[in-house]
Image: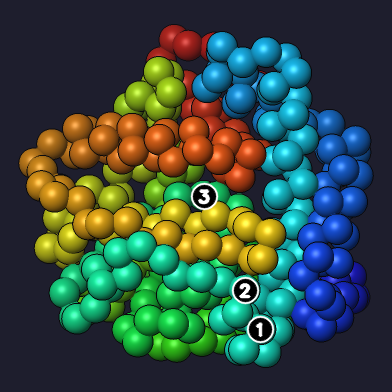
Amino acid sequence: MMARLGIAFMRLLAGLPLPVVRALGAALGSVLWVLARSRRHVVRVNLRLCFPGWSEARLEQVAREVFVRVAQSWLDRGWLWHGTPEVVRSRIRLTGAVEELAGEAPTLLFAPHFVGMDAGWTALTQQVPRRFVGIYTNQSNATLDAWILAGRHRFGQCRPFGRADGVRGLVSALKGGEVMYLLPDMNFGPEESIFVPFYGLQAATVPSLSRFARLGRARVVPIVSVMTETGYEVRVLPAWAGFPTDDVAADTTLMNERLQGWIDEQPGQYYWVHKRFKTRPPGELGVY
């Protein structure tokens, strides 16, 4: 029942002006900042580890912004998934090296966990005439699961692969000319990760960007989605030259280095609510 009510509320948001939706998101983020104590602690620890030179005032400012941006991006799914196609297109600008997406060459999109990640996927599937695939984690609530799947696959030719489906189908899709939208910049545990630097700390990082690029003989094109006052700007960056190499660790280190540069431009829009450093190298104490 609660899932259905929540979805009905999101449908109502689709018809509201964007400033109203964003104001509601700001209010929701402020409430969550007060109530979600454990997640507030995670954000503060992440920022303190990654930006040790920041003052406490700067850290608190960005931490609060993270909560607001996450809440705003969640409510934006109302118009992303239920707004008219014209409204969606008018609020999402696809900019940069869009020509990198033309043709049928195997293409792997590196899409980091900025709050605009769903807007990035929506922009690509709506505005780029290619076939897309992504990795999907099923939700425990069947109603919510169906809603998210329908929202993320409302435009274009796109299909999800479950995490349990293995890599063979994804590699085949890449080789067949489908564009893969990959978000590998999270901590999925020690079984799937290697330790490479992230803001000077050894961070368990999934090396899937390098491995999928090599297995699918695909070039890597970064996608950085930025929340703006008028919606989102989805920046397509030039394909990486000389990537991948034969050194998976070096490739994954390079991925984190470049990600840091994008985060530095907009630290309040990165998904710091995730326990990025929950998996520690042997012998190191937990940080949360």
Residue at left offset 39%, top offset 39%: 259
Quadrant the N terminus occupies: bottom right
Residue 180 is at least partly visible in this image: yes
Name the one closer to the observer, 58 or 50: 58
Three-letter code for the amino acid on which mark 2 is drawn: Arg
Q: Are marks 2 and 3 in contact (CB under 8 Å)?
A: no
Under circle 3, the secondary element is loop
The residue tagged 3 is 113
Residue at left offset 69%, top offset 32%: 62
First in sequence: mark 1 vs mark 3: 1
The residue tagged 2 is 91
Neighbor class of circle 3 (other Cα within 10 Å; few <14, some 14-19, many 20+) is many
In this rendering, the answer to whether 98 lies above or below 228 is: below
Three-letter code for the amino acid on which mark 3 is drawn: His
Quadrant the C terminus occupies: top right
Residue at left offset 28%, top offset 32%: 253
Q: Are marks 1 and 3 in contact (CB under 8 Å)?
A: no
The residue tagged 1 is 87
Quadrant position of residue 178: bottom left
Quadrant position of residue 31: top right
In this rendering, the answer to whether 129 lies above or below 36 is: below
Residue at left offset 19%, top offset 71%: 106
Q: CA distance from mark 1 to mark 2?
A: 6 Å
Q: Are marks 1 and 2 in contact (CB under 8 Å)?
A: yes
Three-letter code for the amino acid on which mark 1 is drawn: Val
Q: Position of residue 69 (x, y in %)?
A: 71, 49
Q: Position of residue 121 (x, y in %)?
A: 49, 70
- Left or right of 25? Residue 166 is left
Under circle 1, the secondary element is helix
In this rendering, the answer to whether 288 lies above or below 241 is: above
Q: CA distance from mark 2 to mark 3?
A: 20 Å
Under circle 2, the secondary element is helix
